[in-house]
Image (spheres, grey):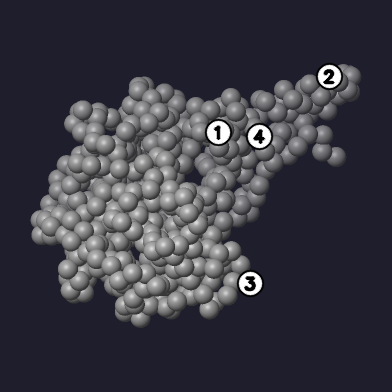
Amino acid sequence: MKIMGPIISSSYLIISLLTSLVMPVAATEVTKVSLNAVNVGAVIDKVSNAYGGEYLTNADNLTIKESYKRTMVGQSETPEILNLRKIDRTAIVDFTTNRAQVTQSIKQREITFFMRRIFNQGLFYNINLLDNTYGQPVPANRQTISGFAMLLNDIGVAKLLTENIATAKLLSEMTIEAVPFHGISFTLPNGEQLTIYINKESGFIKRTLRQHPSVGLIRTEFSHVVHSKHFSYAKETESFFNNELAMVVINREVTLNTALPNKFANVKQYQQRNKDLYPSKMTVRQLSDNVYLVGKAAVHSLFIVNGNNVIGGESYAGIVERFDALKKHLAKPLQLTYLVVTHHHSDHLSGVHELAPLSTNIVTVKAHSQEIINRMPAEFDKKRLVFVDSEMPLNNNIANNTAVKVFDIATAHSSHNLILFIPAEKLVYAADYYRSSNEAEDIVGFTDLVNFRQAIDKLDIQAEKFASVHGIRLLTYQQLIDATDNYLKFNCLQFTYICQGENHPNY
């Protein structure tokens, strides 16, 4: 007969048995609670000792240099392909001053992002290393900046456990690969619950589980533990989103109590950007007599109006809300007759299902039709899909001066990408080829912006200005020329680790 759960050691069982013979039932229950509390502390002590003991718990700072690959679900050049993005990252957390700095490059096919996140004095700064600028800093906690790096590392999880020990609860044991493991859950600084499984013999963390609001259950597995003079950590990590492999660490180096960089978590070397062009409230921006750019934050749809008929572009989530904002702005009933889906990427299809209850015809290419159908209810009429083959006019009884042409261009970003061209305005509307988040920001060239310019030039449409899904600033053709003609690769000399995979010293 089991008097206590399997988490209680044999010595505690003997004490409990003897005590129960001479104590009333109520006292016995108190003893069980006390013993359970002791075991939580004992398990946490075992974890702490496995990863460095006081050397970890009293550490001044932690530095993690790692490279990992992450799946790009719904973001590949075709729906059939699954691409991986590579992240090279250096995360530094200073526990003595509660500051953090994460510098990383994200390489995903046609573009590489270089960024730095800083947490200092309760504020989060998101820095673009291409132009050394940042937007409006926002209140945050340290986990906002360094949380993912800590959670992807077993030594980081161990440190988080010791910092949040008051919330720790002992769970049932689990057997993994025929080895018994303790279970503990505790609360992270952002309020999320993290469950960890600890090898009963060694104290090392094998697995963590947490529920993410967007991707669901995240399971992370740690292996290949290495030992330095004072501490230990796992060299290999795999994470799964709902049992689908999501990321794999390919290289990692962890150090404790190293000399911090001279400008660690310092934002004085960067410049805050000018007026933000990602409006927080829904805005209707009139570009010409019948052309409107409508949206908020970094997502905007284009609408071309003639009478009560409207042609729209972009099926990002909130398309109906953006169309309703246009109707309210014009104060008249409107019919969304056509909606052009720019491309098949999951974020750009995130609102296409909103069109199902409407009578809107959905303009796409045959190669992307199944991705759209998969997001529609079973009763959706597939005849509402209109396919573009190279190019297509969408006049829709609209006056000649506001006629629309749809072109299918191919770049590294997407093998099919629909752009809208309004000849009377010499205006092109496109997705993902440039961003302009503030009024003074230079348009930064990158490889696929060059592809985009080349595709536009081949069309011979004499475009003079460009509107984007992302942001409300218009780009002129001259700015497109300047950005692509003067395209320079990022200078990585001061960020050698995040560029370690490149042969050219100035990449």
- Residue type at mark 1: give it: Gly
Q: Position of residue 86 (x, y in %)?
A: 33, 56
Quickly name the residue at label 4: 170
Quickly name the residue at label 3: 379
In primary-sequence order, the first of circles 1 and 2 is: 2
- Residue type at mark 2: give it: Ala
**What residue is rendered at 61% in x and 37% in y?**
184
Q: Are marks 4 and 1 in contact (CB under 8 Å)?
A: no
- Residue type at mark 3: give it: Glu
- Residue 306's image quarter? bottom left
- Residue type at mark 4: give it: Leu
Q: Are marks 3 and 4 in contact (CB under 8 Å)?
A: no
In primary-sequence order, the first of circles 1 and 3 is: 1
Q: How many other residues sit within 10 Å of disc 2, few (<14), some (14-19) or many (≥20)?
A: few
Q: Does residue 75 appear left or right of residue 171 in this picture? A: left
Q: Are marks 3 and 2 in contact (CB under 8 Å)?
A: no
**What residue is rendered at 42% in x and 40% in y?**
281
Label 4 to label 1: alpha-carbon separation: 18 Å
Quadrant for the C terminus in the image:
bottom left
Given residues 93 and 23, the one toward you in this image is: 93
Query: Closer to us: mark 3 or mark 4?
Result: 3
Q: Is residue 210 above or below residue 489?
A: above
Q: Position of residue 165 (x, y in %)?
A: 56, 27
Quickly name the residue at label 2: 27
Q: Are marks 1 and 3 in contact (CB under 8 Å)?
A: no
Query: Closer to us: mark 4 or mark 1?
Result: 1
In primary-sequence order, the first of circles 2 and 4 is: 2
- Considering the numbered disc 2 on the image, is that residue within a helix, a strand or a loop? helix
Quickly name the residue at label 1: 191
Label 3 to label 4: alpha-carbon separation: 49 Å
Residue 74 at least partly seen: no
